[in-house]
């Protein structure tokens, strides 16, 4: 099974740099023989359900990347099935940059950190905006923030990143 994350991330320019800097052989093996990282498994589901925040990246209509922090109670980001994540998007500063960006380009990248355990999970996906009322499975009883929309992410690929250079924090 080819490594889906590498298929997406390793563009010709990236592969050229890997060749130049001596890591091409290592990543060619990963790309050809990696595990199925297009379906979330129990390890990913456990990690995701323990998070109380993550970062989401989008790209604007003008081509600029944008990174937004999303937070809530532990487990607000839900694994709905092995290809789908969902969360309620709460009212914040009301700039709507992420929401606006995905209207023209639905591709997103999520970055989830666990500093205490020195672990990170990166996810590529496609984001769909939906009505809160259509997704009661995302409800957070007792949480006082006002949800404005439901966000559903169809996972394309994920990658566990090495712990090197992650500063342990509580």
Image (cartoon, grey):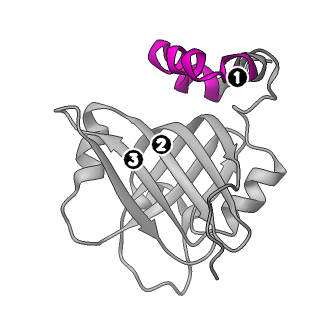
Q: Residue at x 66, y 51 (%)?
A: 80
Q: Who comes first in sequence, dot 3 or dot 1?
A: 1
Secondary structure at numbered mark 1:
helix
Q: Residue at x 61, y 69 (%)?
A: 167
Work out whether 154 lies above or below 91. above
Secondary structure at numbered mark 2:
strand
Q: Which residues are magenta?
A: 5-27
Q: Who comes first in sequence, dot 1 or dot 2?
A: 1
Do the numbered discs 2 and 3 sit on residues whose CB atoms are within 8 Å? yes
Q: Residue at x 78, y 18 (%)?
A: 29
Residue at mark 3 to residue at mark 1: CA–CA distance: 24 Å
Residue occupying the far front of the picture? 21
Residue at mark 2 to residue at mark 3: CA–CA distance: 5 Å
Numbered label tally: 3
The mark lying in front, picked from 1 and 2, is 1
Q: Which of the 4 quarters of the picture holds residue 131?
A: bottom left
Residue picked out by circle 2: 109
Quarter of the image for the C terminus: give it. bottom right
Does the stretch in magenta take in 74?
Answer: no
Work out whether 11 lies above or below 93. above
Secondary structure at numbered mark 3:
strand
Work out whether 4 lies above or below 44. above
Relative depth, front residue between 166 and 124: 166
Residue picked out by circle 1: 27
């Amino acid at each position: 099974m080819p490594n889906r994350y590498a298929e997406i991330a390793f563009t010709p320019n990236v592969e050229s740099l890997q060749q130049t800097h001596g890591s091409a052989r290592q990543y060619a093996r990963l790309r050809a023989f990696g595990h199925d990282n297009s379906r979330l498994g129990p390890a990913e589901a456990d990690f995701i359900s323990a998070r109380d925040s993550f970062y989401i990246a989008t790209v604007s209509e003008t081509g600029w990347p944008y990174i937004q922090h999303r937070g809530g109670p532990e487990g607000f980001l839900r694994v709905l099935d092995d290809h789908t994540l969902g969360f309620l998007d709460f009212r914040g500063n009301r700039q709507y940059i992420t929401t606006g960006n995905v209207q023209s380009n639905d591709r997103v990248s999520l970055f989830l950190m666990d500093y205490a355990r020195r672990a990170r999970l990166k996810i590529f996906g496609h984001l769909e905006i939906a009505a809160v009322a259509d997704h009661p499975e995302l409800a957070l009883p007792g949480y006082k923030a006002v949800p404005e929309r439901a966000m559903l992410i169809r996972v394309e690929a994920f990658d566990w990143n090495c712990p090197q250079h992650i500063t342990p924090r509580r």
